[in-house]
Amino acid sequence: MGTNLRYSNRTSRVADYLAEWRPFSVAITLCGTSKDTYGSITRTPGPFKRCRRGFDSLLRRKIPLCLKTMVMTLNRNELFQIKEYAEELGLKFRFDPTLNPRLDRSKTPRNLGLSPEEVVKLDLAEQYILRTPVRLSIPVIFNEYTRV
């Protein structure tokens, strides 16, 4: 069972709360390693700075973190940089190529998705170069793209 916590501009209050109640892990989504990529994905001004501030706040309090990203056409060139960043900090990393509709049910995020072939290439590159297991999401992606 998990809890999804939206962590915005109340950075220190939420970080203090998490430090007191000690979760097993907090997963942070990092959309990119540059503010341009991050901004193009979130479409809001200043999200990269806020995300890093929140991330640093949690690290200072020694909250157990995991870094993740949704890989898409806008950030695929930064995927391995995000993984390297996580490794530098000693954090686990995972990526997911599945893009879900928005809360308003708009399917426009799927327009930014990778092709099944690109997903397989990323999974194989991750397994070979980074020595991590092949991800189990590949069949799910193929089913999603082949559904008519």
Image (cartoon, rainbow, N blue to C red):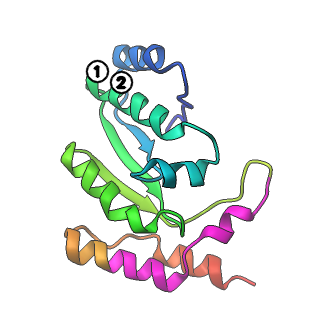
Q: Nearer the viewer, residue 46 or 31?
A: 46
Q: Can residue 139 be spotted in the picture? A: yes
Q: Which mark is residue 50?
A: none
2 relative position to 66: left or right = right
Coordinates of residue 100 in the picture (x, y in percent):
65, 60
Label 2: which secondary element: helix
| Residue for point 37% across, 70% down | 135
143 relative position to 69: left or right = right
Q: Amino acid at mark 2?
A: Ser
Coordinates of residue 102 in the picture (x, y in percent):
72, 53
Coordinates of residue 138 in the picture (x, y in percent):
47, 76
Coordinates of residue 137 in the picture (x, y in percent):
47, 70
Label 1: which secondary element: loop
Q: Which residues are magenta?
A: 105-124
Check disc 1: other Cα within 10 Å, few if <14, some if 14-19, many if 20+: some
Q: Are marks 2 and 1 in contact (CB under 8 Å)?
A: yes
* Majority secondary structure in the magenta region: helix
115 relative position to 100: left or right = left
Which of the 4 quarters of the picture holds residue 123? bottom left
Q: Which mark is residue 61?
A: 1
| Residue for point 53% across, 38% down | 47
Which of the 4 quarters of the picture holds residue 107? bottom right
Q: Is residue 118 above or below residue 46?
A: below
Q: Can residue 1 be spotted in the picture? A: no
Which of the 4 quarters of the picture holds residue 26? top left
Q: Amino acid at mark 1?
A: Arg
Q: Which mark is residue 57?
A: 2
Q: CA distance from mark 2 to mark 1?
A: 7 Å
